[in-house]
Amino acid sequence: MLNLIQNEWMKLWNKKATWVMTILLVMMIVGMMGLTKWMQTINDFGEQDWKQYVQDDLAYTQEQLANPTLVSSEREGFEDREKVLEYRLANSVKPLEGHSRERMIMDSAGIGSVVVLLTVIAAAGIVASEFTQGTIKMLLSRPVKRWKILTAKYVTVNLFGILLMLVGFVVSVMCAYIFFQSGDGQELVWNGKEVVAASVWGKGLYILLLSFANVFVTTTFAFMIGSVFRSSSMAIGLSLFIYFMGNTVVMFLARYEIVKYIVFTHMNLTMYETGNMFVEGITMPFSLAVLAVYLIVFLVISYTTFMKRDITA
């Protein structure tokens, strides 16, 4: 199996498109960070009253806690947030500035948005290209079971996605040190017992891990479409469609109970850190369970089709 994965990895990196995508990722991250710096420069409103901001945030949090319809998970989140905000005011601990170096390192979710566009291309073509190029008969004529071949390809595209995420994170950290100054605030969290200082690097990597869920699910979907229909263009088109239209579908169906069981609702796990949730009453474990079910379905379809397909051309 390791030899198969190594072979698939070498085939992937021998393609010019792979290097182009990697360079494109670096350019896009640098461009995004540069644009953020430029916007900060032209929208510099001077020193802000952070205490007033925290007080307003605390008032909103307490208003939400007064809502009797809050589910337990949401109430717990607001209670933790309340403790942190009260601690800031009581001890005069300033939040990190929005465009500080530390904030840029922690806000790594945007990397996943770029990586998913590039990984989908690799996932869509890693199986479909074998059919379009006519190499599938030679590939399957080897004394290797089909499921091992497909597994090697699936592992390879996910390793590619992980590599791009790490490259994107390293580049964004470098840009954070080049473009932004260190802030004088402090990131705080409630650990269940007390308010403590949060690790900038730990939170940045945690957000990066959460954002990879979107990459992982979308890549698996593209892999399935490419395996079933043997068309990389169809796989790319459908994958990007669900990626860009997912939030729209969730907002449209937000009033219905079925929205909790749609994959789009749970693909962006960073919502549990940012609080930007379209659907109420869902939790991280529930989202992970729903995503696991969809991933199993996607993979079952991929393997069943690939194992039973007759190679006639």
Image: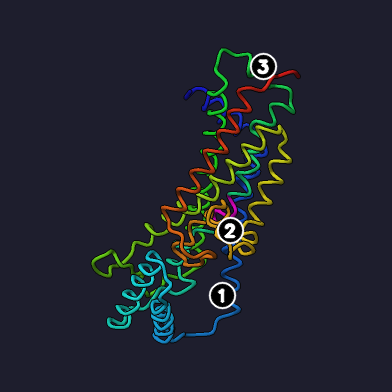
User: Crowding near pointer 3: few (<14 within 10 Å), some, many (20+)?
Assistant: few
Going by the numbered disc 3, the residue's amino acid type is Met
**Whole-percent x, y for residue 48 in the image:** 46, 85
- Tell me how far mark 2 sits from mark 1, CA to CA: 15 Å
Residue denoted by label 1: 40
- Tag 2 or tag 3, which sits nearer the N-term? 2
- Residue at (52%, 27%) from the top-left corner? 5
Residue type pointed to by label 2: Val
Reading the image, the residue beneath label 2 is 30
Q: Residue 94: which quarter of the image?
A: bottom left
Helix or strand or loop: what does disc 3 sit on?
helix
- Pair 3/2: label in front: 3
Q: Amino acid at mark 1?
A: Gln
Query: Which color scheme does this rendered protein use?
Result: rainbow
Main secondary structure found in the magenta portion: helix
Viewer-nearest residue: 257 or 307: 257
**Which range of residues does the magenta coloring cover?**
111-115
**Distance from the alpha carbon under mark 3 to that under mark 2:** 42 Å
From the viewer's perspective, is residue 118 above or below residue 183? Answer: above
Calculate the distance from the C-alpha at mark 1 to the C-alpha at mark 3.
56 Å
Instruction: Work out whether mark 1 precedes mark 3 in sequence or the reverse, and give the earlier one.
Output: 1
Q: Is residue 229 visible?
A: yes
Q: Position of residue 15 (x, y in %)?
A: 65, 34
- Identified at 60% across, 14% down, the residue is 142
Please give the label number shown on residue 138.
Answer: 3
Going 38% across and 70% down the picture, which residue do you hit? 75
Q: Is residue 229 magenta?
A: no
